[in-house]
Image: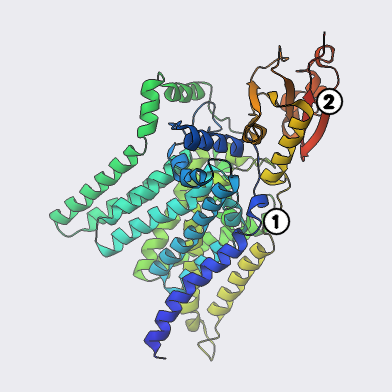
Amino acid sequence: MTSQTRARALLFALPVGLLLVAAVLRLPDLATRGTWDSDQGHDMLVLRAFVRDGVVPLLGPPTSIGDVHHGALYYYLLSPAALLTGGDSPLAVTALIALAGLAAVLVTWWLARAIGGPVAGVVAGFAMAVSASAVDESTFIWNPNLIALSSAIALAGAWRAWTTGRPRWWLLAAVGAAVTMQCHVLGVTLLPIIGALLVADARGRPSGVERRSVWRFGMAGLALVALSFLPLVIHEVTNDFSEIGAALEYLRSGGDPASIGPLGRFLIVGARVVSWPLSGLLTDAPTAALAGTVAVIAIAVWCGAFGTVRERQAARWLGFGLLWTAAFLTFASPSLATVVPGLPNDHYHAFADPMVFILVGMGAGVLWRAGAAAGGTSPSITIGRIVAVIGVVALLGFNLTHQPPAVHPDGGFPAADRAAARIVAAGGRELTLRSLPDFKSTEAYGYPLIRAGAIVTVDGGSGPVAASAGALVIICDALFETAIGAPCGGPAEASVAPPDRYGEPTDRFLAAPGRTISIYRPAVP
């Protein structure tokens, strides 16, 4: 076998191997590994109405800032999977998200390889393939879980345009950026990162004709981004501009209050952005998170100063991209400076994950090459290569030993489906659902109940239930007992289902850790 043939075989084998590793870590037990709560129930109800009843969504999932929503494109992307089963299979939708996770690994490998060579590509690809955070992002239904792929595509398109001199690649970058922004409002952070390279590309062209060509494709890309907001425009025109009104009301109310000062927020948010794809939640592994953050910063600085011309360009671009991300989120989402166990929000900035993995790959690649200059009698065993191997083994080992469990602590959708069956058995098929706290939706159980054929009415009031259609079902989440003002399991439920009207529940059970369901039948006069 010639060296050229071996190189071709290796080029084919590497991405296949990456996909196999990523698939082995993501696809088994897919039905039970992901969390199931109101966000997932809401998304499946929207998709079910879309594919079964033709109700086209013009807004995406609700955000955490009042009545503002993400983009509807998220639902359009998931609709093919929902269509296959008439919206009755969360597993089909989750499988599509898992496939997007596999594709993100492949795109990240390609981009890291294009920047820093084969070693950089292999390390970046395997780091993302085994990342416990990336695996988690691929195993449940949630709008931020698609943005690792879309942002990787945006970065790859921008880099391809910059390095090949072919401005049509900016259209691919725009598509990736548009999907990122639609899937999560904070995805707008990515747009200036892509735009910065576009400006550099235009300024670096030797002739006015070439510069104008770059700007034309850049403007066409911006038009594609704007076009992705067409459903929102239609909604606003037909609904008295309710989204704009909700956003303005949120800003008038003071927005998201900050718990600490800007510098403290910046340090915490920056650490979360960089460490999340490498070691997960900041408070779960603070030592590993700190080590990963310092390592990525050092890699960006070192590669930006001592790498090849291409590596220096990429390191500065990606390094400043992460710096911009931390600075923007410090003010756009100050709640990220507070870690609340049980409330995942690191996925919000998953658009930065590919940047982190690529920098890690670049660092390993530069160490592998430059290590020979550090001394030693054999160029294959050098200080640089030893450091690279130790760092990569530590990263992969940490993540392989911290993979999400086969069954999520809340049992995933199968547990919610069993709870729905028990609700119907105790209360019948005509049900009124009520959530405690009031601001949390009932859709985690509304979806499986509707899927099972129940007739569901939602009581969204803030006081006692005045009347209920059929049995009253109260879903109480102990995570919010402070906001509720009473503990679940009796006292909280009594505040909305007075004993003199509803008596004792016909059934009460723990559907998931901290999630109590009580079923009441109205007292007979």
In the picture, measured across the screen, residue 396 lies left or right of residue 468, that is left
Front in this rendered view, residue 105 or 319: 105
Q: Is residue 494 above or below residue 126?
A: above
Q: Is residue 242 above or below residue 36?
A: above
For label 1, the SS is loop
Tell me residue 139's x, y (percent): 60, 52
Q: Which mark is residue 21?
A: none
Tell me residue 413's x, y (percent): 67, 44
For disc 1, the marked residue is 406
* Number of other residues with Cα within 10 Å of mark 1, as a class: few under 14, some 14 to 19, many 20 or more: some
Residue drawn at x 56%, y 38% as measured from the top left: 44
Dot 1 amino acid type: Ala
Residue drawn at x 59%, y 45% as measured from the top left: 90
In the picture, measured across the screen, residue 208 lies left or right of residue 247, that is left
Residue drawn at x 47%, y 40% as measured from the top left: 75
Tell me residue 72's x, y (percent): 44, 36
Mark 2 touching mark 1, by CB under 8 A? no
Q: Pick out the residue farthest to the top.
A: 525
Residue 123, can we see it? yes
Residue drawn at x 42%, y 85% as measured from the top left: 6
* Number of other residues with Cα within 10 Å of mark 2, as a class: few under 14, some 14 to 19, many 20 or more: some
Q: Is residue 161 above or below residue 87?
A: below
For disc 2, the marked residue is 506
- Image quarter in which the C terminus is found: top right
Kindly indicate the quadrant of the structure image that contains residue 8.
bottom left
In the picture, measured across the screen, residue 221 lies left or right of residue 421, that is left
- Image quarter in which the N terminus is found: bottom left
Kindly indicate the quadrant of the structure image that contains residue 155.
bottom left
